[in-house]
Structures are given as structure tokens and as C-alpha cells.
Image (cartoon, grey):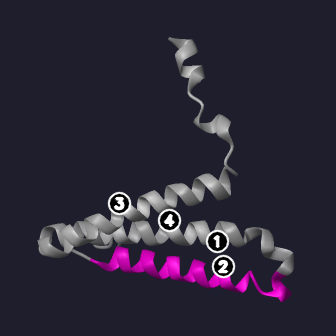
């Protein structure tokens, strides 16, 4: 049943489903900002980050299809994918990890050597 869905080289459906789920998470992000949803406002950032992740994974899946069927579109999308990964890393670092400096401290690795 799912064997055709995960053939991202020849089928665009998985990337479209991921885009749609990302759009749904974005709508949830907007809804959770409403005053009536203040009891669930703590999940707003999670929905925003999950939206961004789903959209990037969907974009990556569509790039696999374009790599085999449309080389010019693939080359253009490759630049945007790199920028989106940089933005996603920044969002996760500042919102999820709250900019904690000890997460990027690799002195523990030097002590093991």
C-alpha cells in the first residue's frame, strides 16, 4: 500500500503531503496565538518549529524528484535548501535551546582525549 508513496525519485506525493502537514502546523501556530487559546499557548513555538521542519523535509523530498527529472529546478532549489537549513538551525538554537552556551562547549571532548 505505501510502496508507491515512498518512491520519492519518481513520485511527488510524499513531498506534497509533507508540505500540507507543514501548512497545517502553521495554521495551528496562528490559532494558538488567539486569546481564546491561551491555555495552549505553550505549544505555539513547538508548532512553529514543527511547521518549519515539515516544510524543509518536504522541500528536500521534492528536490530528489527534481534531481532526476528537472536539473535546472534542482540547481535553483539547492541554494534555497541550504539557506533554509541555516535558518532552521538558528531557530532551533535560539528558541529550543534558549541560547545556552554549554551546548556548544566541546571541552568535554578534549578531556576525553
Counting residues from the start of the chain, the first of labels 4 and 1 encountered is 1
- Report crowding for label 2: few under 14, some 14 to 19, many 20 or more residues within 10 A (C-alpha): many
Distance CA(mark 3)–CA(mark 2) = 24 Å
What residue is pinned by disc 2?
29
The mark lying in front, picked from 3 and 2, is 3
Residue 108: x and y in percent read 60, 21
Q: Which residue is depicted at the point 36% across and 74% down?
A: 14
In the drawing, does residue 73 fall left or right of residue 91?
left
Counting residues from the start of the chain, the first of labels 3 and 2 encountered is 2
Residue 25: x and y in percent read 59, 78
Under circle 2, the secondary element is helix
- Report crowding for label 3: few under 14, some 14 to 19, many 20 or more residues within 10 A (C-alpha): few
Counting residues from the start of the chain, the first of labels 3 and 1 encountered is 1
Q: Are marks 1 and 2 in contact (CB under 8 Å)?
A: yes
Quadrant in which residue 4 is drawn? bottom left
What residue is pinned by disc 4?
53
What residue is pinned by disc 1?
47
Quadrant in which residue 48 is drawn? bottom right
Q: Is residue 20 magenta?
A: yes
Type of secondary structure dominating the magenta stretch: helix
- Extent of the magenta region: 12-37
What residue is pinned by disc 3?
82
Q: Is residue 14 magenta?
A: yes
Under circle 4, the secondary element is helix
Under circle 3, the secondary element is helix
Amino acid at each position: 500500500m505505501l510502496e508507491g508513496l515512498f518512491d520519492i525519485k519518481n513520485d511527488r506525493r510524499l513531498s506534497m503531503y509533507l508540505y500540507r502537514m507543514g501548512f497545517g502546523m502553521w495554521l495551528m501556530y496562528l490559532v494558538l496565538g488567539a486569546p481564546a487559546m491561551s491555555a495552549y499557548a505553550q505549544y505555539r513555538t513547538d508548532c512553529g518549529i514543527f511547521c518549519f521542519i515539515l516544510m524543509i523535509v518536504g522541500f528536500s523530498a521534492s528536490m530528489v524528484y527534481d534531481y532526476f527529472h528537472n536539473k535546472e529546478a534542482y540547481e535553483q532549489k539547492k541554494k534555497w535548501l541550504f539557506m533554509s537549513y541555516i535558518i532552521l538551525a538558528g531557530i532551533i538554537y535560539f528558541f529550543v535551546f534558549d541560547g545556552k552556551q554549554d551546548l556548544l562547549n566541546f571541552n568535554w571532548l578534549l578531556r576525553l582525549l
